[in-house]
Image (cartoon, rainbow, N blue to C red):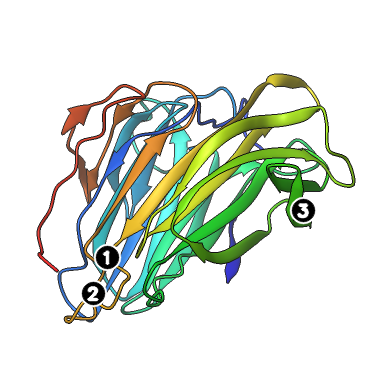
């Protein structure tokens, strides 16, 4: 499921060069979880939630969250960096409706027209079968439709911006690449080894600008764990791992940004708050 969250032009673009993020489980059944994926090339911004500065100097290449929020509607505005307040937003303000028990990722990215936009994705946290993991592929790049290859075979065909495809697969490692729809090469992204982990939703984001600057195309990964029949019915946690470039870790709290850690591509810090 997905819904458009933000739309509009901004003087510059928001982007993600790869990510590494840490997270924990929802604190209560009536909470929703929200992560923000910064996925469009070139502009540092501030993010306000309900009029409060939540992300300060949110730079290209960052993922924030997830934040546990009570179900309800939140007003989000994106301003130029170091704005005094959210009275002159570059994007928004928009109303973000979050339902209890749901897990969301809001992705700022480029549309196929090259303009900044955003999409709110609902992450699939349903229970996986024994021995299986979940792969979610999201096309959020300024690029035509793509195919996703596992080895030489297309496992996803004709995926368009800003759509997603969800697959439940046997645990293991697959060599994945992203190519223009109907082709097998050259690869727009990859090949890259993707680990299918039992009880985990591994979410792959293909982002960047294939039209103006193909060098910005990249893959980024977000992982939601604990989906293999946890007795409490709540996922054990969530983390992200950079697929291409090193980036800091930026979890956030409503009303204030807390810098909790810095990670390279090969290092991920994980907070575990619940045992299976």
Residue at which label 1 appears: 226
Relative horizontal placement of residue 135, taking residue 126 as reference (left or right): right
On screen, residue 14 above or below 145: above
For image coordinates 46% across by 69% down, the residue present is 124
For image coordinates 77% across by 53% down, the residue present is 160
For image coordinates 76% across by 51% down, the residue present is 154
- What is the secondary structure assignment of the residue under circle 3? loop
Residue at which label 3 appears: 160
Q: Which of the two marks, 2 or 1, is nearer to us in this view?
A: 1
The image quadrant where one finds the N terminus is: bottom right
Cβ–Cβ under 8 Å for marks 2 and 3: no
Cβ–Cβ under 8 Å for marks 2 and 1: yes
User: Callout 2: 10 Å neighbours few (<14), some, many (20+)?
Assistant: many
Q: CA distance from mark 2 to mark 1?
A: 8 Å
Q: Which of the two marks, 3 or 1, is nearer to us in this view?
A: 1
Relative horizontal placement of residue 120, taking residue 155 as reference (left or right): left
Residue at which label 2 appears: 234
């Amino acid at each position: 499921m997905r819904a458009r969250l933000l739309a509009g032009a901004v003087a510059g673009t928001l982007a993600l060069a790869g990510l590494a993020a840490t997270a924990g489980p929802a604190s209560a059944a009536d909470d929703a979880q929200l992560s923000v994926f910064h996925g469009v090339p070139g502009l540092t911004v501030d993010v306000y939630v309900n009029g409060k500065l939540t992300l300060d100097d949110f730079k290209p290449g960052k993922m924030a969250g997830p934040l546990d929020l009570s179900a309800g509607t939140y007003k989000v505005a994106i301003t130029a960096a170091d704005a005094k307040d959210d009275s002159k937003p570059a994007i928004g303000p928009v109303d973000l409706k979050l339902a209890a028990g749901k897990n969301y990722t809001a992705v700022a990215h480029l549309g196929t027209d090259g303009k900044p936009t955003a999409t709110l994705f609902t992450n699939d946290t349903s229970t996986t079968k024994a021995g299986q993991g979940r792969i979610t592929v999201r096309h959020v790049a300024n690029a035509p439709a793509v195919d996703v290859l596992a080895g030489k075979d297309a496992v996803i065909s004709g995926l368009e911006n800003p759509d997603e495809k969800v697959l439940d697969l046997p645990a293991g490692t697959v060599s994945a690449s992203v190519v223009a729809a109907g082709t097998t090469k050259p690869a727009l992204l990859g090949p890259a080894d993707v680990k299918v982990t039992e009880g985990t939703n591994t979410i792959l984001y293909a982002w960047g600008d294939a039209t103006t600057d193909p060098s910005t195309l990249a893959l980024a990964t977000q992982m939601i764990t604990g989906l293999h029949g946890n007795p409490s019915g709540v996922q054990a946690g969530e983390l992200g791992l950079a697929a291409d470039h090193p980036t800091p870790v930026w979890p956030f709290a409503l009303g204030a940004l807390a810098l909790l850690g810095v990670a390279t591509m090969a290092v991920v810090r994980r907070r575990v708050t619940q045992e299976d």
